[in-house]
Amino acid sequence: MWPFDLLRKLSRGPDVGETFRHFIGCYLFGFEAEGEQQPTYIALPSNLEWLEREVRQYLQEFVDEHPHASEVPAIQATLADLPQRLAAHVAGGMGQPFLALPGVNLFIRKGMRERRKENGKYAE
């Protein structure tokens, strides 16, 4: 059965948290702004807990830096039930934006990145 597993990993990459050679499956957390050609990536966490921490930190920093922005109520509502929203978004296939704000869409998708090495050994 291993040749089929190898073909699956080569064709679509490892699942989140799963390793394959020097790559690890991860969530891609970022945003796409209107008029921009490429998305901007904020974090590439390899598990749901790390993803929640990164999303919470990013959204809270926005609220702290722009307390009077029109997007703040929507962001605070998202922060209030973030674990449930993340779980629903991840279970739902992640095809839609995680949070749509005027002029920008925050997204969470699956992808892969290189594993981090420390002293010649993989740290994750």
Image (cartoon, rainbow, N blue to C red):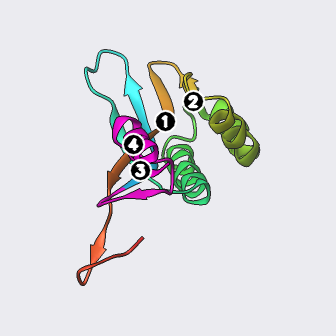
How dense is the environment of label 3, judged by Cα within 10 Å: few (below 14), some, or many (20 and up)? some
Element marked by disc 3 = strand
In the rendered structure, are the residues bearing label 1 and label 2 in contact, judged by CB atoms less than 8 Å apart? yes
The magenta stretch is 1-23
Q: CA distance from mark 4 to mark 3?
A: 18 Å
Residue visible at 57% across and 29% down in the picture? 94
> Label 1, on which residue?
109
Element marked by disc 4 = loop
> Label 4, on which residue?
13
Q: CA distance from mark 3 to mark 2?
A: 16 Å
> Label 3, on which residue?
43
Q: CA distance from mark 3 to mark 1?
A: 11 Å
Tag 2: amino acid = Met
In the rendered image, the quadrant that contains the C terminus is: bottom left
Residue visible at 40% across and 36% down in the picture? 12
N-term-proximal mark, 1 vs 4: 4
